[in-house]
Amino acid sequence: MIPMLDLKLQYSTLKNEIDTAVADVLQNTHFIMGPNVVQFESEAAQYLGVKHAISCNSGTDALHLALRACGIGENDEVITTPFSFAATAEAICYVGATPVFVDIDPETYNIYTQAIKAAITSKTKAILPVHIFGQAADMQEIAKLAKDNNLRIIEDCAQSFGARINNQQTGTLGDAGCFSFFPSKNLGCYGDGGLFTTNSDEIAEQFTLLKSHGSKVRNQHEIIGWNSRLDELQAAILRIKLKHIDDFNKNRIAVAKKYNKLLSSPSINTPSFKENMSHVFHQYTLLSENRDAISEQLNKEKIGHAVYYPMPLSEQPAFNPISRAESLNTTQDICSKCISLPIFPEMTDEQIEKVVDTVKRV
Ligand SMILES: *Cc1c(COP(=O)(O)O)cnc(C)c1O
């Protein structure tokens, strides 16, 4: 049996530190907006190299409130990728805007710049790239397009904590970055959690109001806001894990490189790395015509795996009637061939070889 990821093993290596930090919070009882939240935000801002890092309740909330803080609303169009988790498109719908899905790059599975260009209309207000599976989208080209067309960029970094382009972190390349600390993400807490990043004082101020009842000063409510806070227990755990994130990501990359070497064959497309872009391998996703047979074989051997994602978001009943989709040939093709294998920082060579043998037997 090989799990998709092994959170129990990770906990066992950090147990002393985490148990002590959690016990301190329980003693202290400052459960909301306590000292760990304040410290975590400043440590995350420093790690990412960004002016403002503001915690919130989830990656979904970060996306939703980021769009709002950037002034996106009804009658606006937001161009995004159909090859992502539903939350990416949900957030656009929450603010009353229309998701416009465009095709993806066959190498990186990220939003394709030429397709964005072709989909821009007078209603387009923002581009929402997702750094899918931990590999940065082509932000240099996206930034040029945004500048030329006066569009906002909101990055979905839920899968890319620690990924860089030319040493600049994802989440610092657009107007806003949105991170998730869902337990399975590269930096995960033990519940829900999220982070919003920006270099703009104005957008940061707006986000701060939105995440906390429209209020900065007690008993003074400037706008209608939400209740979206990271709690102190999660912040305490995240501060510990943040110290290890570079090692976690380094180990993931090492696992991916081994997979790439051992799996290389004419019938399998292994994921590619682009130069000057670090891929932090939130998922290790390959393409094969025999995807379903591989899945069956992995099931037989009790090896964790998943299909991320089996259909473009534009085809989901939730989004189909309220979105627009351009031609999505590459997305369709990848949805029919993709399969994600187990990957986690603690994975052993033995485990990797076992997965590879099972895949190769198909
Ligand atoms: C996980 C994820 C989200 C949502 O994050 P939550 O913290 O679960 O709300 C958004 N976008 C992508 C691409 C994700 O993988």
Image (tube, rainbow, N blue to C red):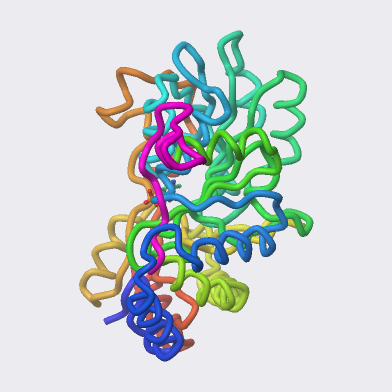
In this picture, is 239 found above or below 214? below
Name the residue at the front extreme: 219
x, y percent for residue 118: 62, 18
- Number of numbered discs overlaid on the protein picture: 0
x, y percent for residue 282: 49, 62
Q: Quadrant of residue 34?
A: bottom left
Which range of residues does the magenta coloring cover?
212-233
Q: Is residue 219 magenta?
A: yes
Residue 95 vs residue 115, the one in the foreground: 95
Left or right of residue 276, residue 269 in this image: left
Residue occupying image coordinates x 39% and y 66%: 30
Residue 119 vs residue 198, the one in the foreground: 198
Q: Is residue 304 visible?
A: yes
In the rendered image, the quadrant that contains the C terminus is bottom left
In the rendered image, the quadrant that contains the N terminus is bottom left
In this picture, is 103 found above or below 347? above
Residue 248 vs residue 355, the one in the foreground: 248
Residue occupying image coordinates x 52% and y 72%: 239
Q: Is residue 109 visible?
A: no
In this picture, is 178 found above or below 350? above
